[in-house]
Image (spheres, rainbow, N blue to C red):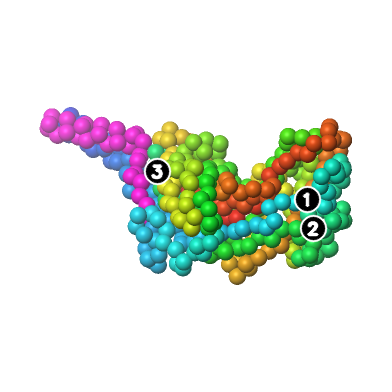
Amino acid sequence: MRKGRRLLSSLALALVLVLSFSLPAFAATTADVTVTAAPSYIAITNDPSTWTINGISGTGKIQPNTTYYAKGSTNETTPPSATVLDAECNFTVTNSSSVNIDLTVTWGAFTGGGADMTNSNAGTNGATTYGAYCWYSGMTYASKVIVKSTGSTAMLTGMTPATTTKKWGVEILTRTDAWTSGTSSTSTLTITATAS
Amino acid sequence: MKKLIIGLLIVGVLLIASGCAPSYSPPTNTPPASDGATASSGTTVLPNEPPVDRTWISPGKVMVGNFHPGARAEWTMSVHNGKDTPASFLVAYRYPDNVGEGYIKPAKEVQDWVIIADPTPVIAPKETKDILIALEMPKDAAVFAPKWEFWISVKDTTQTGMVVTELCSRWLVQMR
């Protein structure tokens, strides 16, 4: 009888120990996954959808190892002012979003021609790589943002719904090696809007 | 006495078994209840009428809380075609360029956890399409960070020219 009691108290103690370990697990399962979203919409457009670098078209060629600035003029080899002006930006983003947004610019590889080059993602050029930056009207040009193929820092953050347009531009430092032929290469420049 | 001991043993074994089993909680969509602006179906109801002649997505941000291996979170994303012509879109998982403070970029395998009901919708002019997005983390997946972020990218694939726009919905995930 005494032996049975001792066994019983040992079991009860073991049970208390088991409970103390298992209770947190029970508590954890009671926390349901939650999914919430504030009412909002994101909407931007961009114009123009092309950049004729330095006004060169047809049989004209851009030069290797040269920086071109998307200023929307025929002289795109000089940088914008210390504080970028509207007139020095080739592109205009129109914002119709209901919440503050961030704008991020990414630029892929140039392929399919004699000026193929990949983005160095560092703002510098190399034998087969180009460097790129972006900027917007009103910002200090020295604070320009490196444009990468992926993983760029946002060019502009916290753009309010009240800001319906914003002018912006990019610059490209072409590769150091000469072009391999006169045929043009193409690439895609993407401007991405996300909620801030 | 014997019966009591056996009973206690059974209870103990059951408790151990339940404590060792992987915990699972059923997925739920919990829309914010305070402002009443979000429907219980997990679809965002917008506060004001978005422009019909602009291409837009909604919502801009989805917050997932108490997430864990084996769990599933869903939200319906709306994509609107503001053009006068039909447009095809690409809705895809997007590794984020940048993330919110306190969040890190996702592990490579996260792209396999995202299910998009219709990744290539063709939307009629001025029409809106609702697309279910689900995040499903396998039971045996490792928790790589307490807070992480990924994006759902929406691109109008009928855009021409070298400069294109992309709209992204941010998913901010907080693990349990």
Q: Is residue B175 left or right of residue A103?
A: left
CA separation in Å, label 1 and label 2: 10 Å
Q: Is residue A191 left or right of residue A137?
A: left
At horizontal 36% and vertical 59% (from top left) the residue drawn is B39
Residue A188 lies, with reference to residue B43, above or below; the image says: above
At horizontal 53% and vertical 49% (from top left) the residue drawn is B87
**Type of amino acid at the residue the image marks with label 2:** Lys
Q: SS for tag 2?
A: loop
Q: From the image, state whether disc 3 or disc 1 is nearer to you.
A: 1
User: Can the viewer see residue A112?
Assistant: yes
* Residue B6 percent coordinates (x, y): 17, 30
CA separation in Å, label 3 and label 1: 47 Å
Q: From the image, state whether disc 1 or disc 2 is nearer to you.
A: 1
* Residue beneath disc 3: B72
Badge 1, how many Cα within 10 Å: few under 14, some, many 20+? few
* Residue beneath disc 1: A52
Badge 2, how many Cα within 10 Å: few under 14, some, many 20+? many
**Type of amino acid at the residue the image marks with label 3:** Arg
* Residue A52 percent coordinates (x, y): 78, 50
Rendered-image quadrant of the N terminus of chain A: top left
**Type of amino acid at the residue the image marks with label 1:** Thr
Q: Earlier in the sequence, mark 1 or mark 2?
A: 1
Q: Which residues are magenta?
A: B1-30
* Residue A149 percent coordinates (x, y): 69, 43
Residue B105: mark in rendering: none
User: Can the viewer see residue A32?
Assistant: no
Viewer-closest of B138 and B160 = B160
Q: Is residue B22 left or right of residue A175?
A: left
Badge 3, how many Cα within 10 Å: few under 14, some, many 20+? many
* Residue beneath disc 2: A71
Q: Chain of mark 3?
A: B
Residue projecting furthest to the bottom: A162
